Image (cartoon, rainbow, N blue to C red):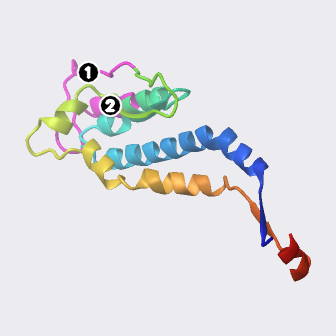
Amino acid sequence: MGLRSKLDLEGIRNIRANIDATLEVALVATARQIAADAAERAPKDTKFLAESIHVTALDFSDYDISRIAAMEEFAKAKAAGETPKGVKIGPNTEYKFFPEIRPTAPKVVFVCVGAEHGINNELGIRGRQPFLAAAVYENRGLLSAQVRTAMNGLSVRSVVTKPKSLKKAVNG
């Protein structure tokens, strides 16, 4: 016979065991990049909106960190009475934060805007450009690149062996 090939079954078991975790890592990395780009693009009147952008997954969330940072930024702006862009903030002005939402299934990740006025900035105020949709569009190829990179560590080894002599190969 000709050449023989042997497939490393341990490699296949490794892929099966680690594929879900690998995909989750790629999803979270992509979502974090989208969140960072959206925060960069978000209006910065008080920085509250930009700081409110966070990532949640089934077993992971930036919600509390984001909410605290957003409220700190708003408190600074409120104490000053005016934002860097000249928007006046009255003593009774409060910004509200949406409650946390989380996916209920694995391999699902949300990029969320916690500030209630974020939807108006994204969809409805004249002169404002969408910040979240633009970040998603900008990173549309990132997930597949992240998955390819993560999957490179999960490989199956194939070993090809040659017969010791040509006579043995012909006679089988």
Q: Is residue 150 magenta?
A: no
Residue that mark 1 sits on:
94
Is the magenta region chiefly helix, strand or loop? loop
Q: Which percent across, then down, holds residue 102?
A: 44, 24
* Quadrant in the rendering for residue 70: top left
In this view, which residue lies farthest toward the bottom? Answer: 166
Packing grade of label 1 (10 A; few <14, some 14-19, many >=20) is few
In the structure shown, which secondary structural element does the residue marked by tag 2 occupy? helix
**Residue at (28%, 34%) from the top-left corner?**
80
Q: Which percent across, then down, holds residue 59?
A: 56, 27
**Marks 1,2: beta carbons within 8 A:** no
Give 131 or 15, whichever is nearer the viewer: 15
What's the mark number on residue 11? none
Location of the N terminus (image quadrant): bottom right
User: Is residue 163 in view?
Assistant: no
| Residue 32 located left or right of residue 136 | right
Is 110 above or below relative to 6?
above
In this view, which residue lies farthest toward the left? Answer: 126
Q: Does the magenta stretch include residue 80?
A: yes
Q: Which of marks 1 and 2 is nearer the N terminus?
A: 2
Magenta residue span: 71-99
**Distance of mark 1 from mark 2, alpha carbons?**
9 Å
Give 171 or 26, whichever is nearer the viewer: 171
Residue that mark 2 sits on:
74
| Residue 151 located left or right of residue 165 | left
Give 118 or 58, whichever is nearer the viewer: 58
Location of the C terminus (image quadrant): bottom right
Q: Which percent across, then down, holds residue 129?
A: 17, 47
Amino acid bearing label 2: Phe
